[in-house]
C-alpha cells in the first residue's frame, strides 16, 4: 500500500520559489489501478517522481507498506527504486543499436540475474504484450505502439510490483492507446499496482480510481 500525507513540493530558485504540489493526500491499495489527472503544469509528473523515490518532497510523509520512506537513507531509497517500481514513460527510451531482446535484457544483467532466468523473464514479458515474434528486431523497425509495448515488457521483466506510467499513451494513436490500456488491465489482474499520469480523461476511465490535481 502507498500512502501520501500532506505532500508538498517547492522548487527554490535564486530569487523565487515555485510550489508544484501542496498538501497532497491519497492512498493506493495493492493491486489497484489509479490515474492521476490534471492539466499541464499541475505537478502530475512531479508527484509520480516522488512516488517512485526519484524526487524528495519538501514537506509531508510518504509510506510504502506501512513503512515511512526515509530520504536520508540513500541505500534504502535505491532498494525501493530497484525492487518496488517499474517505470514507463511517454518516450520509450529504447536503444536502436540493440535488439528488442537486448533492450529488455540490459536491466536484468544489472540486477545480476542469471542468463537462463533472463531468457525466461524476457520471453514471458514479451508474451504478456503479444510481441513474442519481434524479439530480434530493432526498435527502429517497430511502430510506436510496438515500441511502447516493448518498454512495458522491459518493465515487466524486472518483476517489480508497482508500475509507474507517465503519459504512456501520449505518443500513441487511439487504437494503440486502447491496446495499451487493455494490457494494463491484464497486468492489474496479475496483481500489479499501476499508477498512471494522464491528462486524457478517456484513458483515465480505464482505472479503478482517479486522483485529480488542481492548478495552484
Image: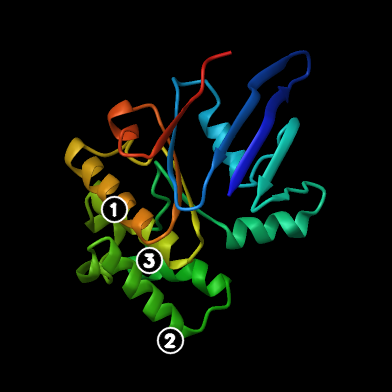
Residue 127 sits in which quadrant?
Answer: bottom left
* Residue 148 can be seen in this image: no
At mark 2, the secondary structure is helix
In this image, 164 relative to 79: left or right?
left
Q: Residue furthest left?
A: 175
Residue 116 disc label: 2
Nearer the camera: disc 1 or disc 2: 1
- Identify the residue at horizontal 23%, vertical 58% (top origin): 141
Q: Residue furthest right?
A: 72
Tell me whether circle 1 and circle 2 mark residues in contact (CB < 8 Å). no
For marks 1 and 3 on the same chain, the one whose residue lies earlier in the sequence = 3
Mark 1–mark 3 distance (CA, rounded to whole Å): 24 Å
Nearer the camera: disc 1 or disc 3: 1
Q: Which residue is mark 3?
A: 98
- Identify the residue at horizontal 66%, vertical 40% (top origin): 55
Q: Residues within 10 Å of mark 3 (few under 14, many from 20)?
A: some
For marks 1 and 2 on the same chain, the one whose residue lies earlier in the sequence = 2
User: Residue 71's x, y, as percent?
Assistant: 77, 46
Q: Which residue is mark 1?
A: 183
Image quarter (top left, top right, bottom left or bottom right) of the C terminus: top right
At mark 1, the secondary structure is helix
User: Residue 23's x, y, as percent?
Assistant: 67, 23
Tell me whether circle 1 and circle 3 mark residues in contact (CB < 8 Å). no
Does 155 sit above or below residue 184?
A: below
Residue sitting nearer the eye, 192 or 111: 192
In this image, 80 relative to 186: left or right?
right
Mark 2–mark 3 distance (CA, rounded to whole Å): 19 Å
For marks 2 and 3 on the same chain, the one whose residue lies earlier in the sequence = 3
Mark 1–mark 2 distance (CA, rounded to whole Å): 26 Å
- Identify the residue at horizontal 27%, vertical 60% (top origin): 129
Amino acid at each position: 500500500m502507498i500512502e501520501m500525507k500532506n505532500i508538498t513540493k517547492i522548487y527554490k530558485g535564486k530569487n523565487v520559489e515555485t510550489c508544484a504540489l501542496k498538501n497532497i493526500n491519497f492512498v493506493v491499495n495493492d493491486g489497484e489501478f489509479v490515474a492521476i489527472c490534471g492539466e499541464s503544469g499541475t505537478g502530475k509528473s512531479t508527484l509520480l517522481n516522488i512516488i517512485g523515490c526519484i524526487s524528495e518532497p519538501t514537506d509531508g510523509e510518504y509510506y510504502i507498506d506501512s513503512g515511512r520512506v526515509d530520504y536520508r537513507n540513500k541505500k534504502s531509497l535505491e532498494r525501493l527504486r530497484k525492487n518496488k517500481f517499474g517505470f514507463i514513460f511517454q518516450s520509450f527510451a529504447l536503444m536502436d543499436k540493440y535488439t528488442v531482446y537486448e533492450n529488455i535484457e540490459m536491466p536484468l544483467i544489472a540486477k545480476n540475474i542469471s542468463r537462463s532466468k533472463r531468457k525466461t523473464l524476457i520471453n514471458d514479458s514479451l508474451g504478456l504484450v503479444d510481441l513474442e515474434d519481434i524479439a530480434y528486431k530493432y526498435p527502429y523497425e517497430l511502430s510506436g505502439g510496438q515500441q511502447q509495448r516493448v518498454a512495458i515488457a522491459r518493465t515487466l521483466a524486472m518483476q517489480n510490483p508497482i508500475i509507474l506510467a507517465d503519459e504512456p499513451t501520449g505518443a500513441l494513436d487511439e487504437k494503440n492507446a486502447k491496446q495499451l490500456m487493455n494490457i494494463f488491465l491484464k497486468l492489474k489482474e496479475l496483481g500489479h499496482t499501476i499508477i498512471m499520469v494522464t491528462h486524457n480523461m478517456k484513458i483515465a476511465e480505464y482505472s479503478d480510481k482517479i486522483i485529480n490535481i488542481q492548478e495552484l
